[in-house]
Image (cartoon, rainbow, N blue to C red):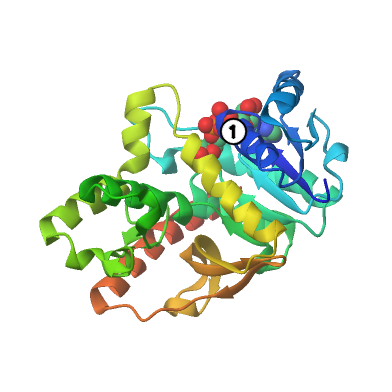
Amino acid sequence: MQHKITVVGAGNVGATAAQRIVEKELADVVIVDILEGVPFGKALDLAEAAPIERHDAGIDGANDYAATRDSEVVIITAGIPRKPGMSRDDLLTTNAKIMKTVVGQVVKYSPQAVLIIVSNPLDAMCHVAFEASGFPKNRILGMAGVLDSARFRTFIARELNVSVENTHAFVLGGHGDTMVPLPRFSSVAGIPITELLDPAAIERLVKRTRDGGAEIVSLLKTGSAYYAPASAAVEMAEAVIKDKKKILPCAAYLNGEYGIHDLFIGVPVKLGKGGIEQVIEIKLTSEEDAALKKSAEAVQGLVEAMKKLDI
Ligand code: APR
């Protein structure tokens, strides 16, 4: 293949992302994990599916980052997932330490890569990756908004009995309980859902979207969602690899946009070869703005907590 993507973490999200990338023939893939054998086994298994799935993308496992050299995109899923009763924030200390080690290795071999962060708590992990990499802010993207809006779209399509392809949804803010789904920018075939659903129904779908991750955790019991998170990360990687200039909601480092400073939070961005090429600013109502600021405060709280722990 012409392109190369590394996926760090050969667990549920990482292996599923690797599968989607090779089956789309987006790039050759290297899967890295600290576990002995596992990244090699998953890569070999995926390679042996290639003749049936009819693709020629290369896929290798690795424990050593030398194999990741010159990756254009690195998707980082390393870390522990939630169990029932845990919030994403409960993962902070463990995953921050893992993120720091991983990013240190990644940048050594792929100094020009765009990093797509998936590990939770997402917005805080983007901060760790930003600091540990020394990369410019446009090359650190957090995967949250694409997933949260895909969940919202699923619920809208089911509620109205229409194709998911007709739906569009917008979600701002942190990847947590304070996320801000925006109904007036969410539509079906271009018609805002505020014209199609009553406020109580919209509120029900918004709440289910906010709790979407926890709903899956409570059903799986042994871990968190991975099919949709992997799809979301791969949509972002594809926008970068193909230089699509696609506007997607991602966690991005804000420097005054939306009145927020020095913080990663979910906003619409234009994704192309260089990573984030533009933060799209939309005018929010005072209510939406207050919800976004509240979400930013929650993320800021985690960043402060990490500083205190000296991670
Ligand atoms: N380097 C590389 N891989 C690591 C490291 C490390 N330092 N530490 C842990 N890992 C690997 C684990 O060995 C495991 O294979 O990360 C993988 C995580 O996989 P799962 O436990 O299956 O977790 P998953 O469901 O994939 O979620 C990973 O993404 O969505 C988020 O909240 C989720 O933070 C979690 C992450």
The picture quadrant for ligand 1 comes to top right
Residue 124 lies, in percent from the top left, at: 52, 53
| Residue corresponding to mark 1 | 16
Residue closer to the observer: 287 or 199:
199
10 Å crowding of disc 1: few (<14), some (14-19), many (20+): many
Residue closer to the observer: 117 or 199:
199
| Residue 78 showing in the rendered view | no
Can you tell which quarter of the image residue 173 is in? bottom left
What secondary structure is marked by label 1? Answer: helix
Residue 195 lies, in percent from the top left, at: 18, 68
| Residue 47 showing in the rendered view | yes
Q: Is residue 186 left or right of residue 92?
A: left
Q: Is residue 196 left or right of residue 262?
A: left
Residue closer to the observer: 47 or 51:
51
Residue 9 lies, in percent from the top left, at: 65, 34
Q: Is residue 220 left or right of residue 118?
A: left
Disc 1 Cβ-to-ligand 1 distance below 8 Å: yes
Residue closer to the observer: 167 or 224:
167
